[in-house]
Image (tube, grey):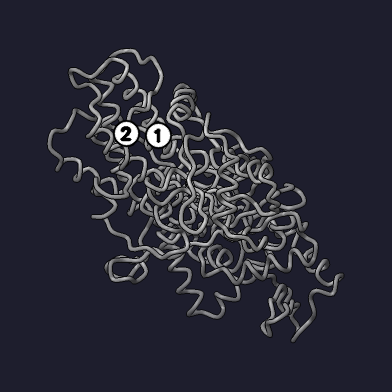
Amino acid sequence: MKIKSQLSQIIQAALERADIPSDEEIIISDASKPEFGDYQFNGIMKLAKQLKKNPREIANQVIEQIPTEGMIAKVEVAGPGFINIWLSNAWLSDQSSAILDDTRVGVGYVEQPEKVIIDYSGPNMAKQMHVGHLRSSIIGDTLATLLAFLGDEVIRQNHIGDWGTQFGMLIAYLEEQGTDSSHQELKDLEQFYKDAKVRFDESEAFADTAREYVVKIQQGDTHCLQLWQQFIDSSLRHCEEVYEKLGVNLTRDDVRAESFYNDRLPAVITTLQSQNISTTSEGAECVFLEGSDTPIIVQKGDGGYLYSTTDLAALEYRAKELQADRICYVVDARQSEHFRQVFTIAKKAKMVPESVKLEHIAFGTMMDKSGKPFKTRDGGTVKLIDLLDEAVVRAKATIKERENQEEIDLDHVATALGIGAVKYADLSINRESNYLFSWDKMLSFDGNTALYMQYAYARIQSIFRKYEGELSGAIIIGDELEHRLALMLLKFEDTLTKAAVEATPHTITAYLYELVTLFMKFYEQNPILKEGVEESTKMSRLQLASLTGKVIKKGLEILGIEVVDKI
């Protein structure tokens, strides 16, 4: 339900009928408090300044032209010229009743679908995924699911680092040890990598051999490529295990590794040179951007390429061959300057058309309780698979502590709650902020947590286990709480649209928290199955509860979090 756009059209029509000229976009805001209405229009002050008139006078002219039948029940002028808007109970009843059986719970599709490429996760090959990959994987997957749900064509891209010196080093060590990599588990492979790095650092002869193997890989040597592929396959098997446990929808088909762009790199240099965008400086090919004395190196003096070169090739491929309208990179905020530079060069060189939106979806760092980057007790990197396993174990312990438990499949529920807790804790904060990782906070049944949402959903399902009848009839708004709950349910589409445009998953979690908190008040103050409640009132409240459950489930589904019927 696009409520805000409907209200914008009503305000625009009222301005026209009042003969008040306005070229400004009509922006409708949620009212900050129930006593200020359901929505507010705050644009009168700007209009008054342009027209050199009293803002309250203009506001009063406008509200005289707003019809108070149908959607709107009442409008008032407040303060220096705000227009407060109350929606009609009858309209809310009709609109909420109309989506009771809608699998999309009232959410339509975008009017102009875009082809959106989302680059996220990006694990390192020959190493286990660690907590540093968690935020990119969770945020990126949520945005991909959200945009696809709204009707965009989404292409997931997992840009893995599978090229470079480390693979020459691994192959050289493999040959030196006479080991068969095809039978190694990744944990062994990671230790193998560490041992190879020691050899690389301590032996110049070994390092030279490793570099020779890099050249052989790049030149397509069959034997070296076979060994290289074994390392990649072993690494990807581990990644797939993590993605499955985490509920992230990345497959091998989504992998677009550095090696994929290798053949395109010379053309990047040719493009930059032909347009006089790059220049040779101290033997290297560089781009100097206006306002900076530090060059962006796109080709080293020895002919080697850098991350910026690969990223430019990827941008051109995605813009021209995949024909993307919007390209999003879900990458650590510390890479902001890199992406600013690469985006600028790509547009300047016309590798990406001006119409294509390039976005760095930046995110902050996960910190421990002391405010330092999250590490193991001995200072090592926390393996992502270990973190997820611990989340399930802790969730199981949290469930066992609860009283009045229903009979449940403990392992299944603990997995849903544990993994959901980790994901929701990440998604519930502004993605650009650093956040403190706290098991106690994320596994609490109180506050803005996944468990609070999952418990609310389970409570709703328990109502229907007790009722066991057929649902029929419409939603009837009987009091202020029911008005606010129905309105909140109808705000779902506006919420998802805002989250999609701004790439802010926390917009969805904030909405769900407000929805669930409101439902809990409704549940406590408006008896549903209590003896003596009129049948029409009982049925209406059951319908409100049912619709609330469906919206919670859909919201969590978009966030990649599972609901359970019992906790």
Is 266 on the left-hand or right-hand side of 473? right
Q: Report the front residue among 515 and 421.
A: 515
Determine contact: label 1, label 2, CB under 8 Å: yes
Q: Which mark is residue 457?
A: 2
Mark 1 or mark 2: name the one nearer the start of the chain. Answer: 2
435 or 188: which is nearer to us? 435
Q: CA distance from mark 1 to mark 2?
A: 7 Å
Q: Residues within 10 Å of mark 1 (few under 14, many from 20)?
A: many
Residue at horizontal 49%, vertical 42%?
75
From this viewpoint, is residue 409 visible?
no
Q: Is residue 194 above or below residue 74?
A: below
Side (left or right) of 502 relative to 20: left
| Up/down of 195 relative to 92, above or below | below
Disc 2 element: helix
Quarter of the figure that contains the C terminus: top left
Query: Total number of numbered labels?
Result: 2
Q: Which residue position holds label 1?
A: 553
Q: Where residue 551 sits: x, y (%)?
A: 42, 34
Question: Where is residue 311, by image quadrant?
Answer: bottom right
Task: Specify the label residue 221 is tagged with.
Answer: none
What amino acid is at disc 1? Lys
At mark 1, the secondary structure is: helix
Asked if residue 46 can be seen in this view, the reply is yes
Looking at the image, the residue that sits furthest to the left is 403
- Identified at 70% across, 47% down, the residue is 19
Residue type, label 2: Tyr
| Horizontal and vertical percent position of residue 323 | 74, 47
Quarter of the view holding residue 114? top right
Q: Nearer the viewer, residue 164 or 78?
A: 78
Quick check: 56 left or right of 261?
left
The location of residue 561, given as percent across then percent down, is 39, 41
